[in-house]
Structure formats: structure tokens, C-alpha cells
């Protein structure tokens, strides 16, 4: 099977995009807000008819130019067309200034995809004091140009456009990013491996991982080269991985750089994680919740993480009650998913939260499996004891905190969730059940008063029915499920017990397919037996033909009769797939 992989490094200074102030000088004119150019994909320029030389087709695909184009999101155009040689009388100038120093490996410019790009661009980088750092002249072909020039600590950029690639055209700038994307493939990638894990009951929230090794004799790869491409790598640098199978690209996966090192022989080893891993570094302030929908709570967590999340199925409307402590966004999302009965997937631009599958969605036939299958039994779990937590308000407010603090802002973390918080000796800027943000104009004593929530606990138990006398009890305890009501607790405890009844753990290698972690599948064994189970882990060798090592937890599929119809099996225990 013909497979290969591409890894795209998004070497952008995203803070520069937010910090930049764009100005144009005649003869440039804006047909949109200049800040629109700083978006990652720029602005979209529709096909409109203009009186430019050999520009638009007379087949109806170009629309008439509007009477009022301002604010339409079309970027910045020159006021005049280039002459018969494609030159402007005076260079067109676009300036970007910053309030803080920034560094990047170059600039990415986008132009009119219908032919409004320049013939040549000169770029000048200055520091915040106005001193010239470097100058570069660049040419290109097409609507996206990468001006490759590593510059550190710049405070202003001046771009000059001398003409257009074709005569009698307007220059149309639709995007500007501070950085560039570098795509590596082929021999440059020595090895690349993706590891995905999932816990179908969300008792934990594992992160996906990418490990790869690059090799090149170019100095640009060396971490110690001050002018190298990778010298500006940052923690959480965005990487886009695309796997190609038989000439067709799979959906790209997104990872974020964790660490990297040179091996001393022209190679660089890198490790990255998916969006789930990023949640560890984002703080969630927690709170007390009463009948809050699953969607609203997940959106609150994702807002704290500054990340997008797609919630599917009926999960959005499930009400949740309880408490979340001050913790990482990853822990907060795990507790929420556990209460909802949800599976969490990373690997994309954001996260996906969806119901756990209850029926098989795919068959892995014997023809796709390679040698080396292993099967073992995990420990029997005979019962689950889940601690159900409840909170009620105490009737009396009391002193919670008293201390002399210096002037300025302070965050006080509270040992127990509180309500009705009041302050003396300072101002209360923001507070929640787990924290208080204070401000003092001068040094002084601060006192916080409020009521506390009293925690109640009781055990919800479920057991395997009709346990044989010879079977020793092995009860699993769940103590930190703080986000569910009584009826939900019984359901969740049973869900955990049911999952641990899937005792058969099978590992095998298959040819590339569309399998995903947490999905329920049926696996055909060599002796004709069938195993129904959840995919708990996948390890994909991207440079080894895309082969995937899969771990499944399941149960034997017992049927009275079965027959094969395409790639689906039907039987008594599963109905029709």
C-alpha cells in the first residue's frame, strides 16, 4: 500500500497578529478593515468584474462590481492600475507597527487569486527605536507568497510593491501573517508515530501524542543555528499532520509541540500533543452548579481554555449539578464527560464531545489483520462503590480569611466552596465559590466573610448479580465524581461496572483504515470467533506504511447463527448493523 506523510510547521508569531497596527499610504485604498488582513486565512475576495486587462471571463462566473465595496472584506487595493509594463509610478507602501518586539521566520502575504499579485516586493524590518534591522527583495508566482527572512525583535515592517505580475492590473492584498508554514515530507521525515488513547467511560482523559524524527544536512534544521528555521520554535507550536494513502489525503490532524532536541547527526527529535494535552496548562476556576446543561458547562470550560469544542447528540441537554474544584481545564472536562457518559476526541482544531457508542459501528475482518495478535483477560471487577456528593449552604456567614497584604491585585484560593462573599479593607473585583480576586490601593489588612457549603456524602453501590461463591469480591471505588445527582449516580455506577465486564483485551496490527479510538467494533479472529469491544488505544506508524497497532477491550460475541453480508455480521446479540 502506497502511503506517505507530510508535517506542516505553522511558524507564526500569533501575538504579533494581535499587536500589529496596519497603515496604508497612497496610492493604496482599503475596501475592508485593515485588521481583517491579520486573520490566519486573510479575507476572501469574490470574483468580480473590473476593467483590468485580460482579467475576467465573459461566462457569467464574475459578478458586477458593487457600487459600494467598502466594508465588504476584500482587503486593500491600489487606487491605480499598473502601466503597460506592469509597473507603478511610485511604489505602494503598507506599514505594520507594534507596541512590543516580535520575531518570525518571515511573512506570508496573500493576494487576489484571480491574478492581482505583485511582480516584486521589498520588505524592511525596523526595531522599536526605528533602526533598520534588515531588508529583503522577494518575487513569487501565485496568490500566496512567503517572504522567507528570519528577523528577531522587530517593531515595524514596511512593505513596498513595485508593480503587478500582469500589466493593467490593480494590486489586491487580502492577507498578511507574521511567519510562514514549512511543509516537510519524504526523506526529511525519518520516523513518525501517532498514539491515540481513549477511556470510553471517561474515568480519565488521555491526550493524543505525536513523536517524529527529522533529518537534513541543512543548517536550517540545527537548533543551535541562530538563523535556522527551528530556532524560533515555541512551546505549543502548531503542527499539522497529513497522511496520504494511495494518493488520497486523509483529514489533517493538529498537534502542539512539547519538546525537541538535536541528536548531533543532523536530526531533530520532536514530541507533540493534541488539544486535550493543551488543557493541562489552562486553569479552570470551578464552581457550584445546579441543573446546568452539559453544553453550557462544557462551553464554560472551553471558554477558560480559549478553545473550540463541538458537542453532539443528546449530551447538550443533560442537566448537571454539583461542584468542580479549582483545577485544570483537562480535569474539569474529564469530570464533566464522566458524568455525561461522553467520549472526548482531540486531533482537530478543537475538541469533539459525543455520546459513547452502544452498538458496533465497524467490522475489522481477518483480511485486514497482520500477524502478532495477542489476547488476555484483565482482572474481574465484581462491583462499584461510587461516592455521591451533595452541598448545602450553611446559615451563618463567618470569617474566611484575614491577612495583611501589599498594594495591588491578589487571588485568594479558598479551602471549601463559599457563597455570599464580602470584603473589608479592599475591593472584590471578581469571585466564585473557589476563589476571590482582590485589589488593594495600599498595604493593609483584608478580611473576607461569607458562608460555606457543607458537603454530604453517601455511597451508591452496584454489584454483579449471582456472583459465584468461588469468585472473590473485587470492588472498584470512585470517590471524585462530584458532578451528578442521585439518579445519575446510580446510572453512572452501573455504566462503570458494565464496562469492566468487557474483560478481554486484544492487541493486533491492521492495515490503514478509518478506525478511531472509543469506537465499538467487531473483530474477526483466525479461529472464527468474534470479539465485540471498544478501541482503547491506537499506535500508527506513519512512516511504516501507516500500519496501526490497536488495543481493544471487549467480550466474545455469542450468536445462535451468523452470516456474512459484505462486511457486516448479524446475530442474536447485536441485531442488524
Image (spheres, rainbow, N blue to C red):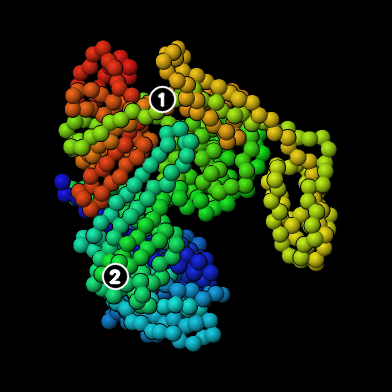
Where the C terminus falls, by quadrant? Answer: top left
Say the numbered circle drawn on residue 88: none
Q: CA distance from mark 2 to mark 1?
A: 49 Å
Residue 394 in the figure: left or right of residue 315: right
Q: Is residue 216 visible?
A: yes
Other residues around mark 2 within 10 Å, as few (<14) / some (14–19) / many (≥20)? few
Vertical placement of residue 329 versus 409, above or below:
above
> Within the image, what quadrant is residue 458 found in?
top right
Q: What residue lies at 42% left-to-right and 82% top-to-bottom?
A: 124
Vertical placement of residue 159 versus 548, above or below:
below
- Label 1 secondary element: loop
> Mark 2 highlights which residue?
264
Q: What residue lies at 70% left-to-right and 34% top-to-bottom?
A: 455
Viewer-closest of 348 and 215: 215
Other residues around mark 1 within 10 Å, as few (<14) / some (14–19) / many (≥20)? some
Vertical placement of residue 369 versus 160, above or below:
above
Residue 347: where, in percent of width, then height? 38, 48
Residue 411: where, in percent of width, then height? 69, 56
Residue 227: where, in percent of width, then height? 36, 77
Q: What residue lies at 41% left-to-right and 50% top-to-bottom?
A: 274
Looking at marks 2 and 1 on the same chain, the residue that comes earlier in the sequence is marked by: 2
The residue mark sitting in front, 2 or 1, is 1
Residue 391: where, in percent of width, then height? 70, 33
Q: Is residue 149 visible?
A: no
Viewer-closest of 111 and 233: 233
Vertical placement of residue 219 versus 6, above or below:
below
Q: Residue furthest bottom?
A: 131
Say the numbered circle drawn on residue 380: 1
Residue 187 in the figure: left or right of residue 357: left
- Label 2 secondary element: loop
Amino acid at each position: 500500500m502506497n502511503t506517505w506523510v507530510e508535517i506542516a510547521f505553522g511558524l507564526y508569531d500569533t501575538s504579533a497578529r494581535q499587536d500589529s497596527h496596519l497603515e496604508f499610504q497612497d496610492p493604496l485604498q482599503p475596501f475592508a478593515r485593515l485588521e481583517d488582513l491579520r486573520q490566519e486565512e486573510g479575507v476572501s475576495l469574490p470574483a468580480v468584474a473590473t476593467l483590468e486587462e485580460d482579467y475576467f471571463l465573459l461566462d457569467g462566473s464574475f459578478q458586477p462590481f458593487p457600487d459600494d465595496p467598502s466594508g465588504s472584506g476584500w482587503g486593500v487595493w491600489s487606487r491605480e492600475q499598473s502601466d503597460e509594463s506592469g509597473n507603478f509610478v511610485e511604489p505602494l507602501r503598507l506599514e505594520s507597527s507594534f507596541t512590543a518586539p516580535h520575531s518570525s521566520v518571515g511573512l506570508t502575504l496573500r493576494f487576489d487569486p484571480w491574478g492581482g499579485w505583485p511582480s516584486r516586493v521589498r520588505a524592511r524590518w525596523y526595531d522599536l527605536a526605528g533602526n533598520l534591522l534588515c531588508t529583503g527583495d522577494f518575487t513569487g508566482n501565485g496568490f500566496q507568497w512567503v517572504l522567507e527572512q528570519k528577523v528577531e525583535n522587530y517593531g515595524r515592517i514596511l512593505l513596498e510593491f513595485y508593480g503587478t505580475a500582469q500589466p493593467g492590473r490593480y494590486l489586491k492584498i487580502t492577507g498578511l501573517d507574521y511567519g510562514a508554514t514549512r511543509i516537510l515530507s519524504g526523506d526529511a521525515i525519518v520516523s513518525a508515530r501517532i498514539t491515540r488513547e481513549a477511556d470510553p467511560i471517561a474515568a480519565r482523559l488521555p491526550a493524543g501524542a505525536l513523536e517524529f524524527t527529522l533529518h537534513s544536512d541543512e543548517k536550517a534544521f540545527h537548533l543551535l543555528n541562530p538563523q535556522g528555521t527551528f530556532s524560533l520554535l515555541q512551546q505549543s507550536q502548531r503542527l499539522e499532520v497529513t497522511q496520504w494513502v494511495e494518493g488520497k489525503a486523509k483529514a489533517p490532524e493538529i498537534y502542539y509541540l512539547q519538546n525537541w532536541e538535536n541528536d548531533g547527526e543532523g536530526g531533530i527529535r520532536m514530541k507533540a500533543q493534541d488539544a486535550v494535552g493543551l488543557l493541562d496548562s489552562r486553569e479552570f476556576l470551578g464552581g457550584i452548579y445546579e441543573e446546568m446543561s452539559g453544553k453550557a458547562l462544557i462551553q464554560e470550560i472551553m471558554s477558560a481554555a480559549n478553545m473550540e469544542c463541538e458537542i453532539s447528540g443528546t449530551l447538550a441537554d443533560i442537566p448537571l449539578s454539583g461542584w468542580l474544584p479549582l483545577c485544570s481545564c483537562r480535569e474539569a472536562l474529564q469530570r464533566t464527560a464522566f458524568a455525561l457518559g461522553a467520549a472526548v476526541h482531540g486531533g482537530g482544531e478543537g475538541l469533539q464531545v459525543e455520546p459513547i457508542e452502544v452498538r458496533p459501528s465497524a467490522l475489522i475482518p481477518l483480511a485486514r489483520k497482520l500477524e502478532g495478535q495477542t489476547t488476555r483477560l484483565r482482572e474481574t471487577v465484581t462491583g462499584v462503590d461510587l461516592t455521591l456528593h451533595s452541598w448545602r449552604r450553611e446559615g451563618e456567614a463567618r470569617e474566611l480569611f484575614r491577612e495583611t497584604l501589599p498594594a495591588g491585585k491578589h487571588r485568594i484560593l479558598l479551602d471549601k466552596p463559599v457563597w455570599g462573599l464580602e470584603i473589608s479593607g479592599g475591593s472584590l473585583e471578581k469571585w466564585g465559590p473557589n476563589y476571590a480576586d482582590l485589589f488593594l490601593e495600599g498595604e493593609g489588612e483584608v478580611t473576607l466573610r461569607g458562608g460555606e457549603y457543607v458537603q454530604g456524602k453517601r455511597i451508591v453501590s452496584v454489584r454483579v448479580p449471582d456472583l459465584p461463591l468461588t469468585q472473590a469480591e473485587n470492588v472498584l471505588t470512585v470517590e471524585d465524581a462530584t458532578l451528578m445527582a442521585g439518579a445519575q449516580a446510580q446510572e453512572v455506577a452501573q455504566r462503570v461496572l458494565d464496562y469492566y465486564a468487557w474483560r478481554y483485551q486484544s492487541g493486533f496490527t491492521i492495515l490503514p483504515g478509518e478506525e478511531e479510538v472509543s469506537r465499538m467494533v467487531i473483530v474477526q479472529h483466525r479461529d472464527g470467533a468474534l470479539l465485540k469491544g471498544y478501541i482503547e488505544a491506537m499506535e500508527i506508524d506513519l512512516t511504516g506504511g501507516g500500519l496501526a497497532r490497536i488495543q481493544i477491550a471487549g467480550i466474545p460475541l455469542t450468536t445462535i447463527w451468523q452470516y456474512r453480508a459484505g462486511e457486516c455480521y448479524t446475530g442474536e446479540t447485536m441485531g442488524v448493523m
